[in-house]
Image (spheres, grey):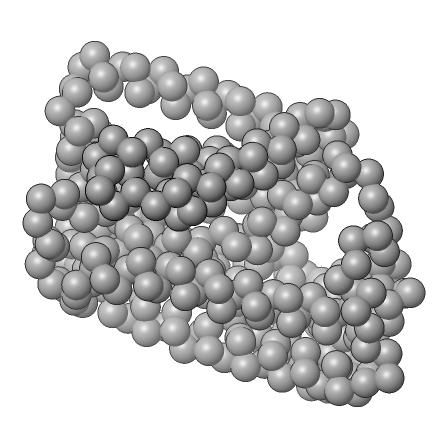
């Protein structure tokens, strides 16, 4: 996220064709500034952070949606269902499509971000599942709209080449269709990246906080701020690690390559996690909730998810991508090995802490008391 923010800023600042002529600033400065912004929002309290997320999200959706509708209407004679025909894809090889699917799935990463905030929600067993499911459906529909508008905006036959040639396709499209109004889309993109970072820091910090509280991670990570009641140590750790990783990746590679390595390195472990959730859904309802088991919801749908995710993960390694993207694949394997080792060590040293890790979302034996803006209890 931090590297993406740096790339967006650098792409616009060095682009003379839009009449800015600004001097290019060091990319690492934008990494540090974005990290500081995310830290301050999360540190001051969940109410401020989530209010900011909702405002930023609403502005982003409005501006992108307005441009998408504008392009579709402006090119009414070019609208075509061919954009939804897989046979029209520029590349049709089975393995390449699944390699590309990992980036498409990246658009949905974070849909489960409401879950770690359950401890600070009122009636979390009702509101959190609704937020996750309805949010996923809404964003899915919006991505389809924006994707189609991008194809129509560049032109169906020119879309692939034009999108690849543009450093930032939606800024280019806004420049074409809105003239100086491209600045609004630039603002929306910056807003989007910062809003995503804000959501990720808050969700990740709550997980780290819970694991620290329950003894899985160092106890210091389970502390809360005496005034703001936020997991400030976990927040600081998340932002520090993320900023350091971004600076190292940007130093080792150019920004776009660093973003690619980070995206694959982040998403493949998440896909493994999603796969585990699909498989455990079936196991949980067959073993713990047999009376509620539904073949469609708890059997067939999770199975479809397992199959698709296995294919996506498999084709990230067969064949291996070229360097330096392949480094992300090796990072994932090292991470899995380290994770299994840590799990085995915890099982031997502190099995109770692992059992308590289920509290990372909601206490299993009681509804979580409302906390609201006060932060974790």
Q: Residue furthest right?
A: 157
Tell me if 136 is positioned left or right of 181 in this view.
left
- Identity of the residue drawn at 60% across and 79% down: 65
Percent across and percent down for residue 88 are 85, 56
Tell me if 343 is positioned left or right of 190 in this view.
left
- Identity of the residue drawn at 37% across and 55% down: 113
Percent across and percent down for residue 259 are 63, 46
Query: How many numbered discs sit on the rendered protein?
Result: 0
Q: Nearer the viewer, residue 199 or 31?
A: 199
Percent across and percent down for residue 47 are 25, 69
Q: Is residue 32 above or below residue 260?
A: below
Tell me if 255 is positioned left or right of 57 in this view.
right
Tell me, yes or no, if residue 196 can be seen here. Answer: yes
Q: Is residue 13 above or below residue 354?
A: below
Tell me, yes or no, if residue 241 can be seen here. Answer: no
- Identity of the residue drawn at 33% across and 63% down: 130
Q: Is residue 369 above or below residue 175?
A: above
Q: Is residue 170 above or below residue 339?
A: below
The picture quadrant where one finds residue 229 is bottom left
Q: Nearer the viewer, residue 207 or 130?
A: 130
- Identity of the residue drawn at 57% across and 74% down: 188
Q: Nearer the viewer, residue 280 or 198?
A: 280
Percent across and percent down for residue 119 are 18, 54
């Amino acid at each position: 996220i931090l590297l993406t923010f740096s790339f967006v800023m650098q792409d616009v600042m060095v682009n003379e064709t839009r009449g800015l002529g600004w001097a290019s600033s060091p990319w690492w400065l934008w990494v540090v500034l974005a990290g500081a912004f995310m830290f301050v929002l999360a540190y001051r309290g969940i109410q401020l952070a989530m209010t900011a997320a909702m405002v930023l999200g609403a502005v982003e959706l409005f501006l992108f949606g307005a441009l998408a509708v504008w392009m579709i209407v402006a090119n009414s004679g070019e609208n075509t269902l061919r954009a939804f025909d897989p046979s029209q894809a520029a590349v049709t090889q089975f393995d390449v499509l699944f390699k590309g699917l990992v980036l498409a799935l990246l658009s949905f990463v974070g849909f489960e971000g409401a879950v770690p905030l359950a401890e600070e929600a009122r009636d979390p067993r009702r509101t959190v599942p609704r937020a996750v499911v309805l949010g996923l459906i809404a964003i899915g529909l919006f991505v389809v709209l924006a994707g189609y508008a991008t194809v129509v905006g560049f032109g169906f036959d020119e879309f692939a080449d034009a999108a690849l040639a543009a450093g930032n396709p939606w800024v280019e499209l806004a420049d074409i269709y809105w003239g100086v109004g491209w600045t609004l889309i630039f603002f929306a993109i910056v807003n989007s990246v910062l809003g995503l970072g804000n959501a990720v820091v808050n969700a990740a910090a709550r997980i780290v906080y819970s694991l620290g509280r329950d003894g899985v991670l160092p106890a210091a990570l389970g502390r809360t701020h005496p005034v703001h009641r936020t997991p400030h140590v976990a927040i600081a750790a998340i932002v520090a690690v993320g900023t350091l990783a971004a600076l190292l990746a940007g130093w080792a590679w150019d920004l776009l390559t660093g973003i690619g390595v980070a995206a694959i390195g982040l998403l493949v472990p998440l896909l493994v996690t999603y796969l585990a959730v699909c498989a455990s859904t079936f196991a949980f309802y067959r073993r713990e909730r047999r009376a509620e088991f539904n073949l469609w919801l708890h059997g067939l749908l999770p199975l479809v998810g397992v199959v698709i995710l296995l294919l996506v993960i498999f084709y990230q390694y067969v064949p291996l991508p070229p360097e330096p993207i392949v480094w992300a694949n090796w990072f994932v394997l090292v991470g899995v090995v380290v994770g299994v080792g840590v799990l085995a060590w915890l099982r031997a040293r502190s099995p109770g802490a692992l059992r308590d890790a289920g509290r990372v979302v909601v206490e299993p034996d009681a509804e979580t008391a409302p906390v609201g803006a006060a932060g974790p209890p």
